[in-house]
Image (cartoon, grey):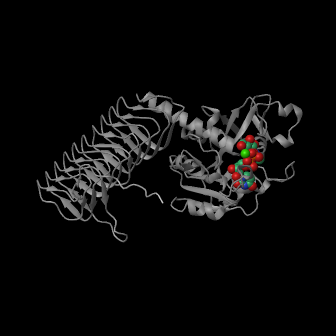
Amino acid sequence: MQDLDIVILAAGKGTRMRSQIPKVLHTLAGKSMVQHVLDTASELNPTRTHVVIGHGADQLRAALAESAVSFAVQEEQKGTGHAVAQAQPQLGNGNVLVLYGDVPMIRRESLTALLSHVDEQHMGLLTVTLEDPSGYGRIVRNDEGEAVAIIEQKDASADQLAITECNTGIMAMTSAQLKRWLPQLSAENAQGEYYLTDVIEMAANEGIKVCTAQPASAVEVEGVNNRAQMARLERAYQQQQADKLMEQGVALADPARIDIRGKLTCGHDVFIDVGCVFEGDVELGEGVHVGPYCVIKNSTIGAESAIDGHSVIDSTVAAGLNQIGPFARLRPGTRLAVKAKVGNFVETKNADVGEGSKINHLSYIGDARLGRDVNVGAGTITCNYDGANKHRTDIGDNAFIGSNSALVAPVTVGKGATIGAGSTIAKDVAEHALAVTRGRHLEKSDWPRPVKKIK
Ligand code: UD1
Ligand code: CA
């Protein structure tokens, strides 16, 4: 296979973001912009990937520590050509593709199209025609319609400013071409910068054809310079994901009001109401119904389950036919067997809830195992923490926990046992026994209330 180097420019400051975080680390759908670019880049199976860093270099190194990239440091930002030159010593002898860390929505298809043109006699340039081209470099074509130069906005004549075909910045060429051209760049222009865009004219002068390609949509090559553009791109990205889900048969109450920050996989006939956020890897089985304003992270929800509004679910596995919420909070390690129910204002953590068991209202169940068909009354608390260590609660099949009970762990409630409402259970309860620890009911008939003394 052809040797390929991908160079990602990410040294700029991003002043207009008004942020302490380097621009390319700002997130789109929960993932940094530069990571989006890296993920797309890796689909091309490059031999090497280089990230040119400068502003916030340490933060970038830390954020990308797990990635198979090499860094090239650009101490001073002297332009895009100067930036690419910093990676030059590390380049191989095949092709080179230049990408931008702040252009996160670029698609693989556009890049492979660009690379397909590259050889000794050709290079590739991704251009886009914009209604409002201001700020962009303009593509100058000769009488034969061939691209022969890119003129930056600040260097352009009135005629050139009227050109609407713009430079996306993304280009591909052979390593030999690039190595020949980079040393020839000069900073004699309006911005006093080494423009990478000047290589187009050099190519044309050498008789090397500049093959242009356009992305499927302009949003693919949109760069981010400020928060407003960031937010616009986020909406565009979310809309794309919503469209994909609907194509797959998912019913969305409003495709403009769903946020997927990771990967959402859905079975047939899933319905998702407005305002839901999905993070990490989430799987929703067939016929799952998600109510409004739910947050679901790294979880698997089995078929025919209903999650009612305002529920927050993290690292949970629900087997199917479950009823969750409204206002339920399922924390990491929650496992619901088939038909288990977790109702309003219930918090679970590290809890196995058996088949058909119900925790319907206002309870905390943590570090616990519940057998099948257990009924947990309102206001039940597993007291799992003694201030130093966590302890487990084990509740057998068919047990009935009366309302407002405290189960002081470690403790076991046997199968079929009953806990009277309002009990504090600190000792194991035998199978089929009744345990009640509340004070006895005392009653005095016709009891005279004390009256205030008059002085
Ligand atoms: C550049 C192009 C312009 C194109 C536009 C598309 C040049 C000279 N101009 O202009 O034709 O239409 O992108 O958005 O290439 N960077 C560095 N080091 C530097 C300078 C820039 O790493 O010294 C990085 C920035 O972090 C950014 C990218 O390169 O990710 C583009 O830089 P920017 O200054 O935004 O270029 P533009 O002036 O917008
Ligand atoms: Ca820019």
Q: Is residue 435 left or right of residue 258?
A: left
How many callouts does the rendering have?
0
Is residue 392 visible to the viewer in this orientation of the structure? yes
> In percent of the image, x 54 and y 44: which residue is there?
29
Picture coordinates of residue 174, whole percent (x, y)? 64, 49
For ligand 2, give the image quadrant.
top right
Picture quadrant of residue 435:
bottom left
Q: Position of residue 351 (x, y in %)?
A: 29, 54
Q: Residue 431: x, y in percent?
A: 11, 56
Picture layout, residue 424 above or below residue 363: below
- Camera-nearest residue between 116 and 267: 267
Please indicate whether residue 212 sits to the left or right of residue 298 in the image: right
Image x and y of residue 347, in percent = 37, 51
Return the residue nearer the eye: 179 or 34.
Answer: 34
The extreme bottom residue here reads 388
Q: Quadrant of residue 77?
A: bottom right
431 or 8, which is in the foreground?
431
On the question of residue 177 being in view, the answer is no
Q: Is residue 53 above or below residue 199?
A: below
Q: Residue at x 34, y 68 (%)?
A: 386
Q: Is residue 83 left or right of residue 436?
A: right
Residue at the extreme left: 432
Q: Is residue 112 above or below residue 185?
A: above
Q: Name the residue nearer the viewer: 210 or 134.
A: 134
